[in-house]
Image (spheres, rainbow, N blue to C red):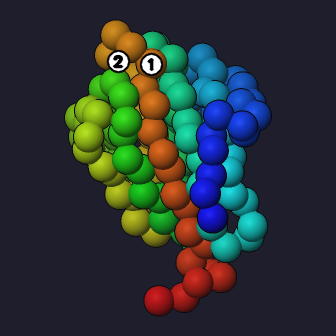
């Protein structure tokens, strides 16, 4: 399946997961087994701390830089790098750079796809 994010509606999510500002999300797949999203985080906006229970999250940063806080530990990240939040961890994101951060996020549902 080819997915064209240019054709997918962008939805503004104020205070996403309890964060500051708003996050723009394009959801390409959400079939109960996996979610595939392109997320844009404007300068100064954040994704609030949230746990991953029953799933994990894999992120590939395409543009910008910022940092994750994963289980209380700061992890700086920039374009070309990936972040993995395994099941049972808690993470959040801060765009403290000078351009919007854009990343792809994949959230497989472990309950539907046991290892």
Q: Residue at x 46, y 31 (%)?
A: 102
Residue farthest toward the top in the current orientation of the protein: 98
Q: Is residue 90 left or right of residue 50?
A: left
Q: Quadrant of residue 84?
A: bottom left
Q: Which mark is residue 100?
A: 1
Q: Which is nearer the eye, 4 or 106?
A: 4
Query: Callout 1: few (<14), some (14-19), or many (20+) C-alpha neighbours within 10 Å?
Result: some
Q: Residue at x 56, y 69 (%)?
A: 108
Find disc 2 in the rendering and name its residue: 96
70 in relation to 23, above or below:
below
82 in relation to 92, above or below:
below
Q: Is residue 77 left or right of residue 20?
A: left
Q: Is residue 3 left or right of residue 75?
A: right
Q: Quadrant of residue 31?
A: bottom right
38 in relation to 111, above or below:
above
Q: Which is nearer the eye, 25 or 92?
A: 25
Q: Which mark is residue 24?
A: none
Describe the element under mark 2 as helix, strand or loop: loop
Residue 29 location, x and y as percent? 69, 58
Q: Residue at x 29, y 34 (%)?
A: 79
Residue 60 location, x and y as percent? 37, 47
Query: Callout 2: few (<14), some (14-19), or many (20+) C-alpha neighbours within 10 Å?
Result: some
Residue 70 location, x and y as percent? 35, 48
Q: Quadrant of residue 23?
A: top right
Q: Residue at x 67, y 73 (%)?
A: 33
């Amino acid at each position: 399946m080819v997915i064209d994010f240019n054709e997918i509606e962008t939805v503004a999510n104020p205070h996403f997961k309890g964060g500051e500002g708003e996050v723009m999300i394009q959801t390409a797949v959400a079939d109960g087994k996996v979610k595939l999203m392109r997320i844009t985080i404007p300068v100064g906006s954040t994704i609030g701390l949230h746990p991953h229970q029953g799933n994990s999250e894999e992120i590939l940063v395409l543009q910008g830089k910022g940092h994750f806080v994963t289980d209380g530990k700061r992890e700086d990240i920039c374009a070309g790098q990936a972040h993995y939040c395994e099941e049972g961890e808690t993470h959040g994101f801060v765009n403290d750079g000078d351009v919007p951060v854009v990343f792809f996020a994949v959230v497989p549902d472990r309950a539907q796809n046991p290892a």
